[in-house]
Structures are given as structure tokens and as C-alpha cells.
Amino acid sequence: MKKFLLSTAALLFTLGASAQAFTVTVDGNPVENGATVYSDHYNNDAEWLDPELYVTTEEDATLYVDLQNTGDTMIMFCWPSSCRTISGGNSFSINGSISGGVATDLQLHAMPMDDPFDATCNITLYLEGDEDNYFELTINMHYDSDVAEISAADDAAPVYYNLQGVEVANPENGIFIRRQGNKVTKVAL
């Protein structure tokens, strides 16, 4: 019985140690591991798409970032102390120190070349010494200068789908995909 209790305690300690040690937000919203996030956050001063991508760790750590540009447009990534431009279909890896309890801005930018404009990248994050416990997300960035079209889309009635893609007339108590005009988000009701 003593061996069983020690084995169980060791397993629980191991599971606790591999829990995600950081949180990720995009445009102020928490992101779940494996999520696809849509961002139309446009920086008028710089004239580029600028999703607000933040990572917060519990303790000081070295964060590793693997970024893959899956679109055919240029994306710029600025962190920790330099900027890199990644053309479509390419990827790179970088790491840097982050302070525990402080939201670190991983500066991701895409300069619209067309109207409308879309850029997509896959990002994998992990902490040094915990490479098996990674966090993945996909960011789809969209720009469309037609303000009337965007306003009309925001006023459209939302349509809800379950996670299998089946439309739900009266969503309640669960996680759903909400499409309202051109915007698609994951919501918990």
C-alpha cells in the first residue's frame, strides 16, 4: 500500500509539474492551447496589422518561440531585441528571457499589400527545460478598408455552431463557434 501511495504522489507531482506554466492572450482575450485566433487589430499610425500577442509566465524563464508563416505574405516578428521578416512558407525559431508575472509583448506585424488582405502564421511556445509541454496557436490576420462592409458585418445576426460544425439554434452551456458577418470566434456560454 505504501508503494502505491508513493507512486500515486509521484504521478500527481509529475502531472502538476507539466501543467502549462504560462498564459497567452491575443487582442486582450485568453487563448487556449491549439486555438485558431482571428485578428483584425489594425495600427493606424504604422499602417499594419498588429495583433496584441502577450505571454505571461509564473516565474522568470527563457521562452522559445517557433513561428511558421503559412501564408504568402510577409510577416514581421519583433522580440526580444530584434525584428525578423518572414516570407510566406518560411519559419524561424528564437528565444529570450521573460519576467514572471509580467505580460511580455511578442510583437507580430503584417503590412497589408492588398485590400482585403490576409496573413496567417502558426506559433509554438515552450519554456526552457519543459520542451515537451508546448503551446500552439494559429493567428489569422485580416484587413479590409471598406468600413461600411465591416460595420454591416458587425450588425449581422450571429450564427452559432458546435465544435463539430453543426449549426445550433439556441446555444447554451458549452463551447461554440460564433460567426457574425466576417468575424468568427470561439465562445463559451
Image (tube, helix red, strand yellow):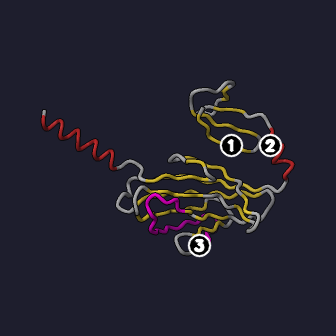
Rendered residue at 66%/27% (across/down): 168
Label placed on residue 84 = 3
Q: Amino acid at mark 1?
A: Val
Residue type beneath disc 2? Ala
Residue 52 in the image: state x and y as whole percent.
62, 58
User: Which residue corresponds to the image point at 65% horizontal and 32% vertical from the top-left?
Assistant: 161
Query: Few, some or many C-alpha atoms within 10 Å of disc 3 (few <14, some 14-19, many ≥20)?
Result: few
Callout in the foreground (3, 2): 2
Please report whichever mark, 1 or 2, sits nearer to the chain's N-terminal start.
2
The extreme left residue here reads 2
- Residue 50 position, x and y percent, is 67, 61
Q: Position of residue 73 (x, y in %)?
A: 69, 64
Q: Which residues are magenta?
A: 85-104
Which residue is label 2 attached to? 153
Tell me how far mark 1 sits from mark 3, CA to CA: 29 Å
Judge the density around disc 1: few (<14), some (14-19), many (≥20) Cα neighbours within 10 Å.
Answer: some
Image quadrant holding the C terminus, namely top right
* Secondary element at tag 2: helix
Residue at the spot x=75%, y=58% of the render?
117
> Which residue is at the front of the view, 150 or 97?
97
* Residue 4 shown left or right of residue 106 in the figure: left
Element at label 3: strand
Q: Residue at x 29, y 47 (%)?
A: 14
Amino acid type of the residue tagged 3 in the rendering: Arg
Residue 95 shown in magenta: yes
Q: Total number of numbered labels?
A: 3
* Quadrant of res 51: bottom right
Residue picked out by circle 1: 184
